[in-house]
Image (spheres, rainbow, N blue to C red):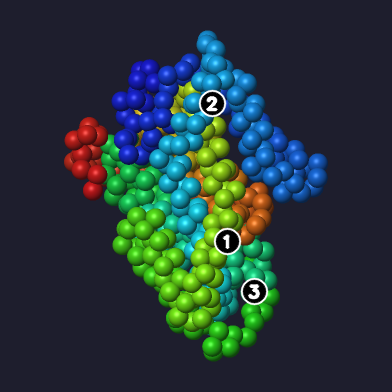
Amino acid sequence: MTDINQSLQSHSSAGVEDAALASNQFATPSGWGLSPIVVFLLLVVSSGLINEDFTAMPTLTAFMITVGYALILNPGGSTLSLTQKVDLFCSNSGNRTIILMVMVFLLAGAFYSLTIDIGARDATVNLGLAFVPEQLLLPGLFLISCVISFAMGTSMGTITAIAPIGIGLAESIGIPVPMALGIVIGGAMFGDNLSFISDTTIAATRTQGVKMTDKFRVNLLITLPAVALTFVALLFVEFGEPPAIPADSYRFVLVVPYLLIIAVALTGMNVLAVLGIGIAAAGLVGLGTGAFDVMGMLGSIQQGIGWMQNLAVIALVVGGLVGLMRAYGGIAWLLNRLTRSISTRRQAEFRIAALASLLDISVANNTIAIVTAGPVARELSEEFDVDPRRTAGLLDIFSCGFQGLIPYGGQMLTTSALAGVSPLVITAYCWYPMLILLSGLVAIALGWPRLRAPHSADFGAPIAARNMD
């Protein structure tokens, strides 16, 4: 098998992964390089068990303690000064992926605050309660999230648009708010996994040299049982009697900001532009209805940004921490360990799934996990005759499944910040991400789906020579 670092550098997709984050200048494989994430999980879980409350350990505090531990470590075979380690931390904290995430968080908070203050969230929920049959409220929330995320190609954009509605719905019908947020995250990860314009789809198909349509067919056949089981399970969730909805409680003008943000998002517009349009629309509706004056509107925007400041700092810290783990050789060690002692096609598929899963747990970003795992997965596919269409699907399924479960991922942190609850509490209700992981394991064990059709014409063509469309 070729050298992992050479393979990674030759196959990394520019525009998907920041150069600083992909840096391997110190990456001699070392298991200690992954120990910071273990320290973080131990801090959160142990404090939760001791206090019988998983919100006991503040997330940012746990990460700052973890960073302190990480700065004590060194790459295998070399010693870095504290200044060099801090430089590595800062360069990775400031990469474009992290900064974009921070901007999304802050604008999402502003939009959320405005929609609450003008009554848009409550009006949208009341509209649903008035016209959607009771038994379909929760399955409907899931399916709407699925459709929007598939069309938008982004889980974060879907969560920004739908999570506030989910929170309002939960408060209206008496279900736990974390349950509603888990439903939204599940639907958001559906589109992140399957959408043709999702970063994860692009990364998975490019690294394996397959068509998006081929990968989509494989993914869909594997994940459909998870969609059906989630829908059926939500049909049996019991909740209180929805309140009587007065006719004037869902004025159409108040719903316009949500309709507009969904409509422009479906056009494929940049997520920052989508949020900017949503904020402007909510502000104008608020001014027009007398919900606030200009200074009140600005105060509402500032309030929402304030709600997300803690989350923005967490994103920066996580980016820097991942950079240190990579520089210490943790990622290289993981890749090496997972590619040993393979003798059958099925074993190769399980290792590919484990590779995508553990990398996502390590870097908290499913796109980066796929880009990192892709070259190694392709080599395994060629060596053990795994159909690359299956490889692309497995990479996407397992990275997206864990991205919808890890408490320090952007999706979970965003929803927990909006609702003011612990990410670990939400994880218990993320049924769809759990089910797609189970579906993926069953598919590997059974060899499903069986691909008898010939490969497409551009199957296995060099990445640079293929048209991404």
- The correct choice, above or below, for 326 with respect to 468 in the image is above
**From mark 2 to mark 3, how far is it between C-alphas?**
48 Å
Where is residue 391 shown, x and y percent of the image? 38, 37
Name the spot of residue 304 as percent of width and height, x first: 55, 60
Residue 16 vs 135, above or below: the answer is above
Residue 86: image tag: 2
In the rendered structure, are the residues bearing label 1 and label 2 in contact, judged by CB atoms less than 8 Å apart? no
The residue drawn where x is 55% and y is 16% is: 81
User: How far is mark 3 from mark 1, CA to CA?
Assistant: 27 Å
| Amino acid tagged 1 | Gln
Mark 2, Cα crowd under 10 Å, few <14 / some 14-19 / many 20+, is some
- Looking at the rendered image, the disc whose residue lies closer to the viewer, 3 or 1, is 1
First in residue order: circle 1 vs circle 2: 2
- The reply to whether residue 420 is visible in this rendering is yes
User: Which percent across, then down, holds residue 416?
Assistant: 61, 54
- The amino acid pointed to by label 3 is Ile
Marker disc for residue 303:
1
| Quarter of the figure that contains the N terminus | top left
